[in-house]
Image (tube, coloured by chain):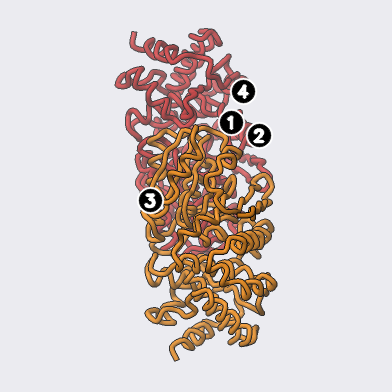
Chain colours: A orange, B red
Amino acid sequence: MKSVKQTLQVELGDRSYPIYIGPAILDNSSLYQRHITGKQVLVVTNETVAPLYLQRLLAALDGFDLSHVILPDGEQYKTLDVWGQIIDELLARRFSRNCTLIALGGGVIGDMTGFAAASYQRGVDFIQVPTTLLSQVDSSVGGKTGVNHLLGKNMIGAFHQPKCVIADTASLNTLDDRQLSSGIAEVVKYGLIGDLPFFEWLEDNVSKLLSRDTSALVYAIARSCQDKADIVSADECEVGQRALLNLGHTFGHAIETGMGYGKWLHGDAVAAGMAIAAKLSCRLNWMDREAERRVVKLLKQAQLPVDPPLALSPERMVSLMSVDKKVMDGNLRLVLLKGIGDALITDQFETLDIVQTLNEYTQ
Amino acid sequence: MKSVKQTLQVELGDRSYPIYIGPAILDNSSLYQRHITGKQVLVVTNETVAPLYLQRLLAALDGFDLSHVILPDGEQYKTLDVWGQIIDELLARRFSRNCTLIALGGGVIGDMTGFAAASYQRGVDFIQVPTTLLSQVDSSVGGKTGVNHLLGKNMIGAFHQPKCVIADTASLNTLDDRQLSSGIAEVVKYGLIGDLPFFEWLEDNVSKLLSRDTSALVYAIARSCQDKADIVSADECEVGQRALLNLGHTFGHAIETGMGYGKWLHGDAVAAGMAIAAKLSCRLNWMDREAERRVVKLLKQAQLPVDPPLALSPERMVSLMSVDKKVMDGNLRLVLLKGIGDALITDQFETLDIVQTLNEYTQ
């Protein structure tokens, strides 16, 4: 296979770091040696990923003082209790401030490991090795870490940047089709927010992503990370435009919370959320129906859901949305669309507009 | 009473903040209004402090959307579980990212509230209202927040700076004598580390502190905070000289952990720790016995313990010290003394030196 590797640099002053993207780089020893300063390394992974990649990674880390933790797999385990298992292992092994944590897995593992690294002894190093498309394009950039609370997603956490991200496209070969599609939802999001040419590329190439074409994957991951990095570099702590990245997420979080963590894949919920956002944008006359049709068509081609679950009434959805941390100050703001590649943050709508938009799905 | 107020500025770039020191400023509304940007305010306090000051503080905050949490009192409650009660209240009240937490109490309340502020929605504002001498001179400066773990003190936490600190010297009138002395231990520490003139002032004025003379208290608090701020400003994340502030703490933490959290007051353990550090410094010929005698004499005048507990064998002390996070990388370093006002960080000693020093107490 020809080399199709790419390296991006996320620019955040003295917290800048590289993202390495390419096939079969998960066990590239030199990448780890470049970014680990101490001797002690704790690899955190889950029951699904461990049988596939843990031994390869540990072999690549030969020579370090190694330990590992294998957590249960799923969003429902992204809790303080499970996170505590990482802390317990660090303390049981007497790991110092100079240790490095490595997150081997999807977004849940990345978020929990990152928050453990942020909190252990008030902050130690960590490296992300995302093994799902979703985590490669989403968690790789931004430094958001955390765990869920019964009353809301990601309510406890920290901003903590990794030392590097190693995104191995070959690890996507072991993803099931639903997980792959779920990742494509976030890829589509970057096109929708501010990158029309990328959206058009996706309209032409989504089938290549579904068939796991390496070149297409590397391109889509790199472009998504670049789009996200451009937004995050300008607004690291989400006081302004970074909130654009929440397109589809306020609806999506309501679906995830309402159905119970783990029932809907995150990307599936975001896909439905983006479709709802497009429909609401049309109702408010900010976008035309033709654009909405293109959004829905691409999401469907990616094998993603575009309707909210029937089990959640519009009123329940709105109630759940009001708990989301982006809107908890009582001022419900949403990311909506003026067009494909042209998103905005707005509170210029009524709750009734949301209810009526959701009612369209049940007619 | 004549005005003896002082205001210090802790310089940390865009995280700089003022420390207000003086009598009866705990319910000065204008100080709060100056530093609270949103509407939602959660006051966190404990069962001991609440009956004394909570209503006065809440009255001073009239007009804000107020809530409060009353936690049990004591180092043994500085746990993730108790910390979770703060998070639960924030979520139950649907507090937004724009909220402010106020820590009303001693160091335990300050550390837990600060870590809740650091972690809730990845970071919200907080204000420290320390009501013990220990917390006024210690937790006011430095931004260290966190909770204990069964396997070690402050193992989980974050660096998170307050918006301001309001140190009311009148609140020290309700401290019992042991708590007051415990605070003086940290005051003595600043003299020992690098401020000989302050140590000499303490030799002359410790009785005024014990009798709660307002002017003496304001002076000692301000000078301690200034000494600490000078060290912290130069090394916010403790990669170098900030570790000097741990004088007496590695021995002290071993005593606290070994005896069970809450059995020894923190300042008492630090006092004994400083006396041990002085004795070890003499054994290593870095300091003369006359200086050790002055250290021990001042600590005794302040009604502080200067011996380790008999219940802990020297071997057990050393074992507990090796778990302390300052020494967990296997390289045991201690803060020792070349003289009064002249501390150093060193690993130039043998474990046997520590054991022999501790054995001196049992002969």
**Mark seen at residue B242:** 1
Mark 2 and mark 4 residues within 8 Å of each other at the beta carbon: no
Report how far apart the C-alphas of labels 3 and 2 lie in the structure: 40 Å
Nearer to us of marks 1 and 3 is 3
| Residue ID for mark 4 | B195
Cα distance between the residues tagged 1 and 3: 36 Å
Tell whether label 1 touches label 2 (CB within 8 Å): yes
Residue under the image location 52 percent in, 71 percent down = A330
Q: Position of residue A152 (x, y in %)?
A: 43, 64
Q: In the shown orientation, is residue A228 left or right of residue A149?
A: right
**Label 2: how many Cα within 10 Å (few below 14, some 14–19, many 20+):** some
Q: Is residue B50 visible?
A: no
Across and down, in percent, residue B187 comes to 53, 28
Q: CA distance from mark 2 to mark 1?
A: 8 Å
Residue type at tag 4: Asp
Q: What residue does disc 2 label?
A: B234
* Whether marks 4 and 1 lie on the same chain: yes
For label 1, the crowd category at 10 Å Cα-Cα, with few meaning under 14, some 14 to 19 and many 20 or more, is many
The amino acid pointed to by label 1 is Arg
Asked if B28 appears above or below B174 in the picture, the reply is below
Which residue occupies the foreground of this view, B197 or B42? B42
Of circles 3 and 4, the one toward us is 3
Looking at the rendered structure, whether the residues under marks 2 and 1 are on a common chain is answered as yes
Residue found at x 44% / y 64%: A176
Location of mark 3 (residue): A71
